[in-house]
Image: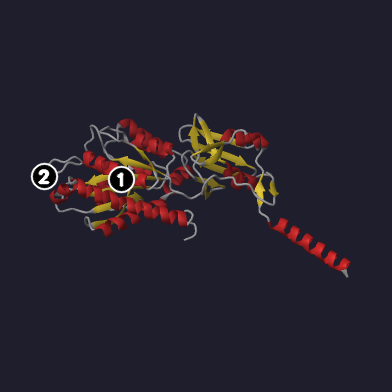
Amino acid sequence: MMKVIKKVLVASITAAFLAGCAGQAAYFKLDPGLQSSIRVIDGYKCVPLTRLCDAYKLSCDWDTYTKTASIKAGTGSIVLRSGSRNILVNGMPKRLDSPVVITGGTVFVPVSFAKNTIAPMTAVEIIPARKAPPIEARKAFTIRKIVLDTGHGGKDAGAVGRGRGTKEKDIALRLAKKIKSLLESAGINVIMIRSNDTFVALPKRSSMANNAAGDLFVSIHINASRSRTARGFECYYLSTATDDNARALEAFENSSLKVSDEAVADRSRRLDKTLWDMALTENRKESEELAGLICQSVAESRLMKNNGVKAARFYVLKHTNIPSVLVESGYISNRFEEMKLRDQRFLDKMADAIVRGILRYRKRYEATEGFTNV
């Protein structure tokens, strides 16, 4: 009887052990030659793109102008861009855990790119294991860094108030500094495009934002109109569906472009259509969501009339490859709102409302893993 019990017990333990092993998740075996190349960048484990391609015998063409890589993996193709989490795999959009970054002249991609994209397209080994070692050092979908763009500056005063001659560049800077302080208090790293009265050309603003590898781009402006009665708060995201007011505002905000800048824009229009469409549309859903939540928070604050979310083709939105919005915090051309904008207490409340909208976006974005499960 005891022998029978022992046999049953041994069989049960063996079956349980085998079932446990079978149920364990597989893990990715990184090429041993790449282990020494791993670097932690902004909380993520990354490897040089060239070393990755060499290790798995992939062909890779790098366009230094557009900072775009075209990779051949097996029978498929991959397109990725510096500063962006979005890639194209066989023409279909896919999102990385962290952006492609350039540091010290070297292009780095997250280790998870090899596991989730390269491995399925090649003969890279996926090994079953009882416990999979962690690859990422942090959650994939987080908002940790925001690029804050202060409109105009230096020789570009922006709009000027009719009543007191208030300059947009000054009010925008005061508001941006208040927003920066509140975001940093919430644990977010803030990169300022300009933090003093300096002129920064539009292409340089976009370039700085892309190189910063931020999670969001927020451009701070003050509106103006020929109509003295125009008033209220507006938040813009990139879209081709614009109205007459948006087109007039586009012309004003883009007016600081120089001849050389326009040449850059013209060169961009001649890029491969697939790549350029990718640049224009990859973050539109997130941008519209961010604009909506900022407008909602401003409306709840009752600081001023809320004109809602608008669409426009501002240069800084079109050429920035992360979710981006442009805020117009009232009309400096309206005498009443000009007086409000000169009041530090009003700017404190406006900064608080804008930041509450951004933090709402962060909460929703992280809770839904980048809006993938809403």
Give me the residue at 72% from left, 55% from top.
21
Residue 320, percent from left and from top: 39, 42
Amino acid bearing label 2: Gly
Query: SS for tag 2?
Result: loop
Query: SS for tag 1?
Result: helix
As drawn, 255 above or below 22: above
Residue bearing mark 1: 179
| Nearer the observer, 341 or 286 | 341
In this rendering, would 133 be left or right of 152?
A: right
Q: Earlier in the sequence, mark 2 or mark 1?
A: 2
| Nearer the observer, 349 or 57 | 349
Residue bearing mark 2: 163
Give me the residue at 78% from left, 64% from top.
12
Instruction: Write down the quadrant of residue 299 in the picture.
Output: bottom left
Residue 187, percent from left and from top: 40, 46
Amino acid bearing label 1: Ile
Q: CA distance from mark 2 to mark 1?
A: 26 Å
| Nearer the observer, 157 or 347 | 347
Q: Which disc is residue 154 wearing?
A: none
Residue 362 appears in the picture as rendered: yes
